[in-house]
Image: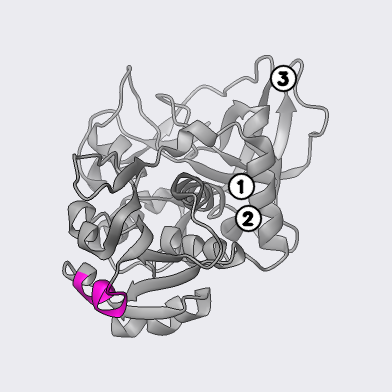
Amino acid sequence: MKAVGVTKFGGPEALEVLELPEPQAGPGQVRIRVHAAAVNPTDTLVRSGRVRGDGPWVPGMDAAGVIDRLGPDADDRLSVGQRVVTLVVPQASQGAYAQQVVVPAASVVPAPENTDFPAASTVLMNAMTARLALDELALSPGDTLAVTGAAGALGGYAIQLAKSGGLHVVADAKKSDVETVRSAGADEIVERGRDVAGRIRAAHPEGVRGAIDAAVLNELVLPAIADGGSLATVRFWNEPVERGIKVHPVYVPSRATDTEGLDRLARLVEKGVLTPRVAAVLPYTEAVEAHRRLEAGGVRGRIVLDFS
């Protein structure tokens, strides 16, 4: 089986095409013939060494493809030949950057109808991250939410889910991304940057009730938040803060087997509530280039590796 991963950690150039044994589905597991795997910022953590265990290490948390094997006691809602998407928690050589991946049946749901494999592969990890962040913030309809990194995949899904829940959204964008962020549903748009909190506070003098920090600005977002408000962070940031603000680090693997939640997100794509954005589709042999583009910044949507 062909996969893309690393045998020694490093930059994008550390990625290589590997020949690995064909994985087998055990009890309660499903094997998926991967057609598309989205490239996410979290994948760079695997590539650069933020992982445990023995290698080789294969990144990838988002895959779309077709079930080709059901393990014993796998969920009877799934069948061989079914088009599916899955949220993968990479374990050593078991990541989404591969021709085949074995995952718990609970992590697999039908792919959104009328959505091709590349688009479908961009949904679950980012949308579930946004869903988890909103659940942690526990805002009420009518409350104002700030979203940083709003032009990216996570930010876009956060805006769309927030609007579907009745929230008022103020989001950041550079000039070239204003229409993208507006099309996601943002009510207000302020200029992005490290001083974005000041611009949000200027528009909302009392501060916003909650914020999702998809731009990973961390403490720089705090001035935008009202006393007693909440901040959802990624990349594990959770430092002491003042003014009664609560910090909620979001860890999406905790929802990897939330079948009902994953399925709900896939169905929201069908309903047009969530809009996948594919920046580019590259052959898996060009994974190095995909990671270089990702780390250069400015990618709008997700780059996808084609394993079809």
Between 144 and 250, the residue placed more toward the observer is 144
Q: Amino acid at mark 1?
A: Ala
Left-right relation of 73 to 147: right
Up-down: is 13 above or below 141? above
Helix, strand or loop at mark 1: strand
x and y percentages locating residue 62 in the rendered image: 52, 45
- Relative to 74, is 205 above or below? below
Distance between mark 1 and mark 2 Cα atoms: 6 Å
At 43% from the left and 58% from the top, the residue drawn is 154
Which span of residues is magenta-colored? 198-205
Q: First in sequence, mark 1 or 2: give its number.
A: 1
Tag on residue 64?
1
Q: Main secondary structure of the magenta part?
A: helix
Q: Is residue 228 above or below residue 176?
A: above
- The residue that label 3 is drawn on is 71
- Label 1, label 3: how far apart the Cα atoms are: 19 Å
> Which element carries disc 3, helix, strand or loop?
loop
Q: How many marks?
A: 3
- Tag 1–tag 2 contact (CB < 8 Å): yes
Q: Earlier in the sequence, mark 2 or mark 3?
A: 3
Closer-to-camera residue (49/271) = 271
Position of residue 267 in the picture relative to residue 253 (left or right): right
